[in-house]
Amino acid sequence: MASASYRYCFLLSISFTLFIVSSALTEADILLSFKASIEDPRNSLSSWSSSSNLHYCNWTGVSCTNSSSPTVTTLNLASLNLSGEISSQLCELTNLTLLNLSDNLFNQPIPLHLSQCSSLVTLNLSNNLVWGTIPDQISQFESLRVLDFSRNHIEGKIPEGIGSLVKLQVLNLGSNLLSGSVPSVFGNFTELIVLDLSQNAYLVGEIPSDIGKLKKLEQLFLQSSGFRGQIPDSFVGLQSLKILDLSQNNLSGVVPPTLGSSLKSLVSFDVSQNKLSGSFPGGICGAQGLINLGLHTNFFKGPIPSSINGCLNLERFQVQNNEFSGDFPDALWSLSKIKLIRAENNRFSGKIPDSISMAAQLEQVQIDNNSFSSKIPKGLGLVKSLYRFSVSLNGFYGELPPNFCDSPVMSIINLSHNSLSGQIPELKKCRKLVSLSLADNSLTGEIPTSLADLPVLTYLDLSDNNLTGSIPLGLQNLKLALFNVSFNQLSGRVPSALVSGLPASFLEGNPDLCGPGLPNSCSDELPRHHRSIGLSAMACALISIAVGIGILLVAAGFFVFHRSSKWKSQMGGWSSVFFYPLRITEHDLAVAMDEKSAVGSVGAFGRVYIISLPSGELVAVKKLVNIGSQTSKALKAEVKTLAKIRHKNIIKVLGFCHSDESIFLIYEYLQKGSVGDMIGGRDYQLQWSVRLRIAIGVAQGLAYLHKDYVPHLLHRNVKSKNILLDTDFEPKLTDFALDRLVGEAAFRSTIASESADSCYNAPELGYSKKATEQMDVYSFGVVLLELITGRQAEQAEPVDSLDIVRWVRRKINISNGAIQVLDSKISNSYQQEMLGALDIAIRCTSVMPEKRPSMVEVVRGLLSLSSKTQLPGSDFSMQEENSVPV
Ligand SMILES: *[C@@H]1O[C@H](CO)[C@@H](O)[C@H](O)[C@H]1NC(C)=O
Ligand SMILES: *[C@@H]1O[C@H](CO)[C@@H](O)[C@H](O)[C@H]1NC(C)=O
Ligand SMILES: *[C@@H]1O[C@H](CO)[C@@H](O)[C@H](O)[C@H]1NC(C)=O
Ligand SMILES: *[C@@H]1O[C@H](CO)[C@@H](O)[C@H](O)[C@H]1NC(C)=O
Ligand SMILES: *[C@@H]1O[C@H](CO)[C@@H](O)[C@H](O)[C@H]1NC(C)=O
Ligand SMILES: *[C@@H]1O[C@H](CO)[C@@H](O)[C@H](O)[C@H]1NC(C)=O
Ligand SMILES: *[C@@H]1O[C@H](CO)[C@@H](O)[C@H](O)[C@H]1NC(C)=O
Ligand SMILES: *[C@@H]1O[C@H](CO)[C@@H](O)[C@H](O)[C@H]1NC(C)=O
Ligand SMILES: *[C@@H]1O[C@H](CO)[C@@H](O)[C@H](O)[C@H]1NC(C)=O
């Protein structure tokens, strides 16, 4: 075929054809010989073959000029696990301008010979295993505009010769092992836009002041290297600078006084974790202007005065962990784009003005451990993007404004160790609040009952105040991992479910509290409480019996109706579809379910019958009641969607039959029962390897539903009772995606009535409108906890026992004993694997949905546990929310 096309061209124009053929073959040959010199374990370059050498511009990673005689300009072979020798032959691609070999496994010194590539403009070797020093001959790369050697093992001094690369726009040497002091060669880099020398721990000496000459520099990263001395005064000349990161060095002295007002384009300013001192330059952001105008005392609504033109783009301001003192720059609090303010662990004084309401993008404030002194501003509740407000260890005083927690995304509030007084306002709007600490203030009044309505509240510290009254009973419905009310004036009975598993010291210092574990037993009140508990328990029992009878009556009614309708008109009203050759009729089904021999168990959406077919096979039939109003056609399509799923960890839908009122779903039947039965069983003795295999199978099934199956499905009812086991203990998910059959409304109301408080439900279920993958992940995490601890998720007895998530969180949090939660029936030799699984389960059951891993990540995590018997134990760490400073 190739020769035919040559001949065709030949007829047209001999010389033109010769040119194309010769140049094409040459470039393809160069590429093929490059391929021959490297290792390609994943065969990513399979398209590079001599059989397609006329189309080399279409090969993986290759781009050519768009002309009649295409030549290679770009080679982008990032992230392919390539290794071997980068040969200088590449430079025979005379028009090669961009070579991107980043994120591979090239293990060699800097390939100086690439400087022969005369057209090369961009060289990216980031994230390889490149080693050795940077030779002075680096100066030969004169044509380069982008040089990225970051994330390798390059060592030694930065040579003076690098100063010859005067065309550079991007120079990235970050995350290497460079040492010595940085030469003063930067004045030459007049085109430089990005300079990154960060994370070179062995760099020493001062920051070269000629960096300040780089008028086009937009991003300067010098963090986590060994720089000491002052921030050069010349930095005020960096007029284009947007990102300045000098954090985690050993810088001292004061910040150049006019720095803030000079860097007008600044978006991110980070000098955190140094030894900088002095008062912060008053000039930052034209702060003086704002103070002089007195805006901080008013709610400021109008346009920003033109005199305040500094920092208008500032989004991140980080000066934490230094030795700054003096007044904190007031103007920062009202910048329209500011997102992050961190200044903790300094000696700043000053206030947070009410004009904070203008900071409409503000997300995080951390100024703990300073000497701020003001009221908590009334404007705080108007900032709707704020999710962390942490100002502990300061001198804030006065009453809390009623709206202080009005931001709908507020997640962490720490006002501890201040001088706040008055009552705690009712908190109603911050439905995402995870952690609230008001410890060590002078708050009075009662604990607001509205706290019990915050669905994800997990850490609550009210210790060391003057709170009175009793502890609201509703708090025991929260999944609190920390509840500290010590040293107040609280009285009355302690709700036992609230404090079980927590140290008694969290209650001490309240002489009038009584209850188990406290010096005072509530002896005098006991009878009354008993009676009321007894009464409510009895009422509860009566109601459930009544409801139960109701359900039975309704079910019976349905059943009779079906039967009779069936007898009257054999096919009328009923239709069935079988996806497997089941020799069974609706009649057989009805008769079978009528018989006493059918074993029935009640699930969330109806009864499950185990039926023996005439052939002797057993099938499970689930009868869905409370179905929505889908047309028969739509219903059929939905069931078909479920029935087409083929995965070893998902139970097969064999068929269904339905009438207007109910649906019978026919599933394959597994003899071994469910994981839930097994955990509940008295002799629950599964080995760890089997449990891990079950967890992996379930995770794989869910990952398949979420990501691989089309349409993507959510399970929405993951729990150990819905995981069946075959004879080899291979798990299979059942009861999946029933929302698609009964309809969203009916599904929600069934869930709400039957399992509203189930501990398998993600906490956000209560307030979120949409079902998400993360909710399945949460439920999976609960199942995983059951497998790890050998405890049932919800224990019926005793009444005040904790659900499993709370139980595990409290154990881990308080006694520092993750090991204590592991099932003691399993040998210690699996401890590391179990701790690894526990870490995954804790992350799956995070109260914050966005912190949960995807099922795909879970599968990967669990598989890595089972492959290496050795541990992620060393980096076993609770995630952030478990170490929230409260
Ligand atoms: C290159 O690939 C594209 C899409 O894969 C295809 O349409 C085109 O025909 C190919 N060109 C050559 C010359 O093979
Ligand atoms: C390549 O050339 C074709 C035809 O001349 C043109 O339509 C196309 O937009 C060009 N593509 C690029 C990326 O320049
Ligand atoms: C190199 O490839 C990576 C990954 O595809 C990409 O993120 C990066 O922008 C590329 N760099 C250059 C300089 O082309
Ligand atoms: C890439 O190489 C590393 C190290 O050899 C190996 O562990 C990893 O599995 C490889 N990844 C792929 C996707 O081949
Ligand atoms: C490719 O490089 C050659 C030699 O350097 C040059 O003559 C030619 O103009 C270049 N072609 C393109 C399209 O840049
Ligand atoms: C180099 O490639 C990495 C990805 O491997 C990318 O993150 C980086 O931005 C690239 N460098 C430049 C300067 O584009
Ligand atoms: C600046 O670049 C010129 C070449 O353009 C070179 O001769 C000189 O040595 C460089 N200066 C420094 C300080 O490297
Ligand atoms: C920081 O600098 C001080 C003196 O300025 C020195 O004593 C100290 O060792 C340095 N610390 C580090 C981590 O380099
Ligand atoms: C808090 O109570 C203590 C002890 O009763 C009392 O001494 C103190 O004055 C009270 N403080 C406030 C602010 O009410």
Image: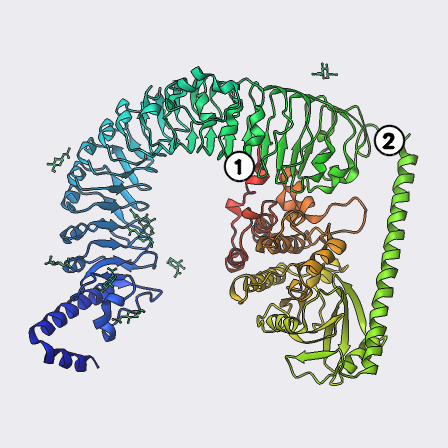
Q: Secondary structure at mark 2?
A: loop
Foreground residue among 761 and 820? 761
The percent position of residue 383, horizontal first and vertical second, equals 54, 32
Label 2, on which residue? 522
- In this picture, is 36 found above or below 356? below
Q: Quadrant of the N terminus?
A: bottom left
- Would residue 742 be seen by someone viewing this image from the given angle? yes
Q: Are marks 1 and 2 in contact (CB under 8 Å)?
A: no
Q: Quadrant of residue 336?
A: top left
Residue 544: mark in rendering: none
Badge count: 2
Q: Position of residue 713 (x, y in %)?
A: 58, 63
User: Residue 307: image x %, image y %?
Assistant: 37, 22
Corner quadrant of residue 17: bottom left
Is residue 724 depicted above or below 538 in this figure? below
Q: Is residue 550 above or below residue 344?
A: below
Q: Label 2 amino acid?
A: Cys
Residue annotated with mark 1: 385
Q: Residue at the spot x=44%, y=27% of the render?
A: 303
SS type, badge 1: loop
